[in-house]
Image: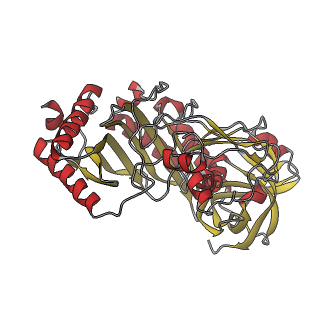
Amino acid sequence: MRAAAKAQMRRKTSEAAAPIELLRERELLQIIETVLRLAKKIGAEETEVQVDEAADALTRFANNAIHQNVSEHGLTVSIRTVFEGRTARTTTNRIDEDSLRNAIEGSLSLAASQPKNPLLLSMPGPQKYSRVNRFVKQTAAITPEDRALAVRRACDLAIKRGQVAAGIFATGQNQMAVGNSRGLFAAYSETHAEFSITMQEKPAASWAKANSADVRNFDPQKLAGRASEKAHLAVEARELPAGRYTVILEPAAVLDLVGFLFYDFAATAVQDKRSCLNERMGKQLFGKNISIWDDAYHPLQLGAPFDGEGMPRQKVQLVDRGVPKNLVYSRASAKIAGKKPTGHGFMLPNEYGEAPMNLVFSGGKSSLEEMIATTEGGLLVTRLWYIREVDPYEKIMTGMTRDGLFLVEKGRVVSAVRNFRFNQSLLEMLRNVELMGPAVRATGEEAFEMVVPAMKVREFHFSEVTKF
């Protein structure tokens, strides 16, 4: 069996030059059908199967040289069974019949040890899905040599400018398929590429990063150039007093803050009173210039058009001109609330319910340069890190600036600034947004990728100067 020959392992090795070929969709279906056939014989009342296959490669560099190049190719089969109102899941990376049978029996054994779940629903039947195309042949065809050449150019720039470069260039492809004993089947595949670089000059450093399904959507050399220029500007940093400042948050900084809002729009979080939206739905919570959708079909997004149970994802407007309007629902939370499921549930069993995973902010028309030009006094923030939640209901976050904080005076960037710690309510921040740039696919370090704009925000609270 071709699938067995390709997938009976998870390995991390030196990478061959030829791109890895993933299984065909019909081969994923064959694995699912095998599990369903075996589960029926063993006595499962209902069975759900998810097959995930990924081939990822990574080139890592530091001190202006590549020091690691690895690839990983693996396949897993996750099996959920239902028996007498109980459910459980097991996972295996072996797809021979004996191993699949053992996994099914393990799932049934685990289910038998669980209490009955009165809210457990029968599995859904066949669904209709909108097509998305996020598998880019040019990304799948990237070789180690391609990545090494891009890294070399970035490191050559660092050497030329007396700087030190470090970072990663990662590419990969993955696919998944979901099927169940009631006839549901859904499949999805995508490619992804990511380049991240930190440039250091003396004690100063700056950073740039991009992520896309299409490796052609970003230029590693331009990202290296941006990080290099900021690192040079940051060498002589001034210390300013803590306080409230107008800030211009680049998209990565916006992402890593607003990313902490995503679970608050989950119906389960609201039902459990763990959301900042409790008692606030339908009320003016943010500025009137803030509108947010969850949209798995947006051209800048990645991710499957179906959720962990195979339900089709719906485009949902979460916030309309500052007013929280809608939540997202799994099948279970929708039944409790008397709503229709929106296709945002996680794989069962889980304690989280659902969440919007494809947030899209409406954005504006102001460029970063225009935001700077219209600022009499303020700070330009490259990114934030080590962000933690202080007050879940008021959504007060704390964290620090990093890799490029700059003083803006009379419409110009005039110097670098020593980093600050902040204590800031996201609710207040999204009421104080004065200008926004076009929404872009942003990537940071504290949140998963979303489509967000750069933002100019007044009265952002910095509580103290940091020690670095």
In this rendering, the answer to whether 338 lies above or below 215 is below
Q: Give the total of numbered labels.
A: 0
Most foreground residue, 76 or 326: 326
Q: Would residue 223 be found to the left or right of residue 131 on screen?
A: right
Q: Would residue 235 be found to the left or right of residue 162 on screen?
A: right
User: Where residue 168 sits: x, y (%)?
Assistant: 43, 48
In this rendering, the answer to whether 265 lies above or below 221 is below
Q: Residue at x 43, y 56 (%)?
A: 118
Looking at the rendered image, the quarter that the C terminus falls into is bottom right
Residue 415 appearing in the image = no
Q: Quadrant of residue 142?
A: top left
Q: Residue at x 64, y 60 (%)?
A: 275
Q: Residue at x 23, y 33 (%)?
A: 33
| Display colour scheme | secondary structure
User: Where residue 235 sits: x, y (%)?
Assistant: 65, 61
Residue 132 appearing in the image = yes
Q: Would residue 155 be found to the left or right of residue 28 on screen?
A: right
User: Where residue 280 sits: x, y (%)?
Assistant: 75, 56
Q: Residue at x 79, y 42 (%)?
A: 321
Q: Quadrant of residue 441?
A: top right
Q: Would residue 423 be found to the left or right of residue 220 on screen?
A: right
In this rendering, the answer to whether 135 lies above or below 252 is above
Looking at the rendered image, the quarter that the N terminus falls into is top left
User: Where residue 294 sits: x, y (%)?
Assistant: 61, 40
